[in-house]
Image: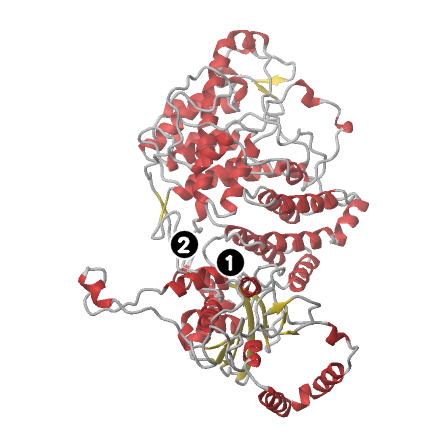
Amino acid sequence: MAERGQLPHPAKRLCCRPGYGSGCRPGQRAGGAGPGGGALCAGSSSAAAAAALGLLPLGKTQSPESLLDIAARKVAEKWPFQRVEERFERIPEPVQRRIVYWSFPRSEREICMYSSFNTGAEDPAAGPGGAAAPGGTADATAAAADENRLPFRRGIALLDGGCVDNVLQVGFHLSGTVTEPAMQSEPETVCNVAISFDRCKITSVTCSCGNKDIFYCAHVVALSLYRIRKPDQVKLHLPISETLFQMNRDQLQKFVQYLITVHHTEVLPTAQKLADEILSQNSEINQVHGAPDPTAGASIDDENCWHLDEEQVQEQVKLFLSQGGYHGSGKQLNLLFAKVREMLKMRDSNGARMLTLITEQFMADPRLSLWRQQGTTMTDKYRQLWDELGALWMCIVLNPHCKLEQKSSWLKQLKKWNSVDVCPWEDGSHGNELPNLTNASPQGANANQDSSNRPHRTVFTRAIEACDLHWQDLHLQHIISSDLYTNYCYHDDTENLLFDSQGWPLWHEHVPTACARVDALRSHGYPREALRLAIAIVNTLRRQQQKQLEMFRAQKKELLHRGVTSVTNLEGWVGHPLDPIGTLFSSLMEASRVDDEGFHGFSDFTENMGQCKSLEYQHLPAHKFLEEGESYLMLAVEVALIGLGQQRIMPDGLYAQEKVCRNEEQLISKLQEIELDDTLVKIFRKQAVFLLEGGPYSGLGEVIHRESVPMHTFAKYLFTSLLPHDAELAYKTALRAMRYVLTDCPERASSSGWER
């Protein structure tokens, strides 16, 4: 029925009359019903049998889904309609109707995502695990008012108010009118809405309201929800080309003349032009077989993705950037980044597409070259936006199911941006002296070589390096795919084991890189897999901490006598561009969250959108690779303490140093929201002892480098947390952080660049 050719705008493909059987009369498809047949297909009712079996309450009736509907629904999800037509010479009309029926989106979640900035499901400024910060009544009232102004909410109100009318579905095209009620200063308006769709995705929208925004207007939302909630009230027709195929010559002429008569002022010039071209034997229109049909669905070559107004995305980002990064524009840009993460979690290809558009506008910001020429640095708020941009690209390229050609395309684009002179550096003002992120080994003497020989690391460097990473490692695949992946025959006597002494899997990789994998899994909608990998990483960190303590105890006398130690990690985990500790903490806190939806379930958007619920964190039993009695909450607290207590060198550059302090304060703030009980106090005691006895691996070790990150803020938190439970240990921690000389033997202190 459909043949490819040059596609006139806006139709997607060309349709021509299919073959007919010799016994078919005009107006009837072979193997099909007449024009009026097959409006709906429903299976036979078996309510009595179901009630007898106890499957349905007495008095309730339900028809089982027909095999036709089951098959049509699957085809409508995966196959472009052109492929269906090419695969089968004749398609019965009832089958076509059911495929067209099931091709419209069935979930309101995507409609909400494409019509509102914040769905209420996630808040980037929320507390740990997504908990919203407590606010006053005035803030809640203002938030509710903002919520009601969202296009999705307004669309629901229009639908509930009976403002949607004249709904008609012709093939893969839905149209209708939405009446906007009269306001105090504005009269009642009627908006004409048209929606095209394909494989359960809306591919284009138009509305006479003239909406100029990234997201769908309330009228598009209202019509879409009408079709989702009241599908049986929508008059459904096959594509218009199918109807025309069923007409004879006289009917076609009457159809065209009536169409021109009704709309003669709009279509008469176009009609005459087309008539002249058709009557000309050598015209371009006669060189193409078939004719365009905007209602016939997608062709095989069409990309199947949700409608995204690229021009509006670019214009909005450009506008926000031109406002100088003030609070309002910065908030809007952060909301755009949150929208990208929301799309990634829904595994929507528009996530990468939207991030590309945003990045292009960021790179075109004229202030970049101005700052470079003047030798000034960008503002912290603007710098944080670039950090988020780089982190999002890490998530994009680490998608575990992306195709090689996609990754190659992203790599090419990232290298292009990376080569631009004004591309911001990763540490804000200086080139970062860190090795390639895929290097998982500790830093040695070569780490301090001349920085002039090293290229500057930009905000895209880590994403470029991550393009070399893959997910094919069998051990990694077993970790993320199963809760039962254990080996109790392993002996804990080598450095890089796959399992620990208890048989639980370990994952030895550069810690920020391993945590970037966790963030990628979470971002792409794989929370279970992300949790499994996070637990394996934390178990590895705990094992390494124990091994480091044993190594230091074996060499303690010699090291303290010489007053010499080594900084084992130039790259701190707190304040790191990839935020490894924050990623592990958030993943584990989400797993310990107690709410009505459960950890992995999706809530109904229309019922729960915008409802700020007070979340609680409990010791949910964790059977995945943890000791008996341990919980996700305990693990989250412990990994936060490990990261905060790590001894590491303060990075170069004022922005990088401020970021370390800011992230430390944010993590401590999240810890302070957790109420300590006996099990958590044990974790604090355990980590405090490790910190005091950990030597060069601990920021509270006996000997530290003078350029180490200060521990005062963290030590204050430890002191206040331990004081009610273990005063002696609390004071030991505080005195060690103060480096109070009376607490240790002064003769062991060295003045050769090391402090006690």
Pick whichever, 146 or 63, lies toward us. 63
Quarter of the image where one finds residue 746: top right
Residue 210 shown left or right of residue 236 in the figure: right
Pick whichever, 415 or 273, lies toward us. 273
* Residue 659 visible at all: yes
Say which element carries label 1: helix
Quadrant that contains the C terminus: top right
Task: Say which label, 1 or 2, has the lower sequence index.
Answer: 1
The disc at residue 602 is 2
Residue 665 shown left or right of residue 459 in the figure: left
* Residue 138 visible at all: no
Q: How many marks?
A: 2
Q: Is residue 180 above or below residue 723?
A: below
Residue at figure coordinates x 51%, y 58% from the top left? 78
Task: Give the residue type that dot 2 points to.
Answer: Phe
Say which element carries label 2: loop
Q: Is residue 278 above or below residue 113?
A: below
Quadrant that contains the N terminus: bottom right
Pick whichever, 245 or 386, lies toward us. 245
Residue 79 placed where, x, y %? 53, 60
Q: In this view, does 31 lie above or below 476?
A: below
Residue 513 placed where, x, y %? 57, 34
Quarter of the image where one finds residue 376: top right
Q: CA–CA distance between discs 1 and 2?
A: 23 Å
Task: Give the residue type that dot 1 points to.
Answer: Lys
Residue 728 placed where, x, y %? 38, 22
The disc at residue 78 is 1
